[in-house]
Amino acid sequence: MNREYLRWYSHRLQRDMELLVFGHTGAKVLMFPTRDGRFWEYEQLGIVASLADKLRAGYLQLYCIEGLATETFYGSHRHPAERIRRHEAFENYILNEVLPLMAEKNPNDCTIVQGCSLGAYQAASLVFRHPHLFRKLVAFSGRYDLTLKVESFGDLFDGYYDDTVYFHTPTHFLPGLNCDWRLEKLRQIDIVLTIGDADPFLDNNLHLSRLLAEKQVGHQLHRWDGRAHRAGVWRKMAPLYI
């Protein structure tokens, strides 16, 4: 199975960025790590191995990137306004550096975005904001409102709120989304959400599902038994849904 390491200096982020590519052809999968994960997390957790058959057969090609959580939402040393601006810069890096690289390396017209936990939020936010660029969203165990306080998970903006936070929070901007073009693009995407029925973000996933239904955006919400917010369950989910 092809494995390729890439690194370059991003002028948008003013730092070196790294990623791993697995597979040689097929649908391209942009993969966001968890809060504490790095670009090699999916390999370390065995999720890449769980997709090995699809990778060898040429059905999928994975692009595992950095998530920059400690510089964005978990950058407690930064003012919340700086956190969301850093996330905007990260999104611009994805749009203007990672996606063009993926297109150059692989002409397949299907691009999937996937993430676990915080990575699920990052994946969903990207797809809902730029639906014309993607064919599928696969989000495991996500929280789609980072201002929510749930169990030990706090408001990642410490009470701060502005238009940028609003437009990067799917459960906030979706109710007011009335652009016919954008809604039509969203309706063309295969959206798959998973959550455990004992997970802290269950209610938030149900809320997102209701919002999508109200906008007539088709999607799947799969509820797994127990607390499914862990790597062992994600390894089982990956070959089923990606």
Image (tube, rainbow, N blue to C red):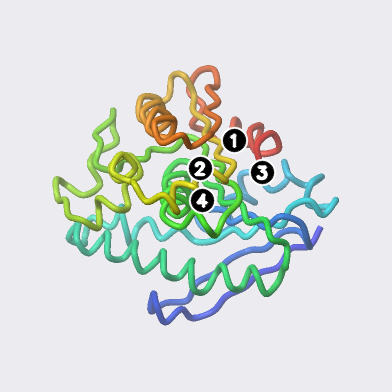
Residue depth check, mark 4 versus mark 1: number of the one nearer the observer = 4
Image-quadrant location for residue 5? bottom right
**Residue type at tag 3:** Gly
Mark yes or no: residue 36 visible: no
Residue 34 as seen in the image, left or right of residue 53: left
Q: Indicate which disc, 2 or 4, sits on the residue closer to the N terminus.
A: 2
Mark yes or no: residue 43 visible: yes
Q: CA distance from mark 1 to mark 2?
A: 8 Å
Residue 38: image x %, image y %? Answer: 51, 57
Give the residue displayed 44% in from the left and 52% down from the top. Answer: 182
Q: Indicate which disc, 3 or 1, sits on the residue closer to the N terminus.
A: 3
Query: Which quadrant does the N terminus fall into?
Result: bottom right
- Vertical position of residue 77 compared to residue 149: above or below: below
**Residue type at tag 1:** Trp
Residue beneath disc 1:
234
Residue beneath disc 3:
46
Residue beneath disc 2:
116
218 or 14, which is in the foreground?
218
Give the residue displayed 79% in from the left and 46% down from the top. Answer: 54
Element class at badge 2: strand
Residue density around tag 2, few if under 14, some if 14–19, many if 20 or more, within 10 Å: many
Residue beneath disc 4:
185
Q: CA distance from mark 3 to mark 1?
A: 9 Å
Element class at badge 3: loop
Residue 109: image x %, image y %? Answer: 69, 60
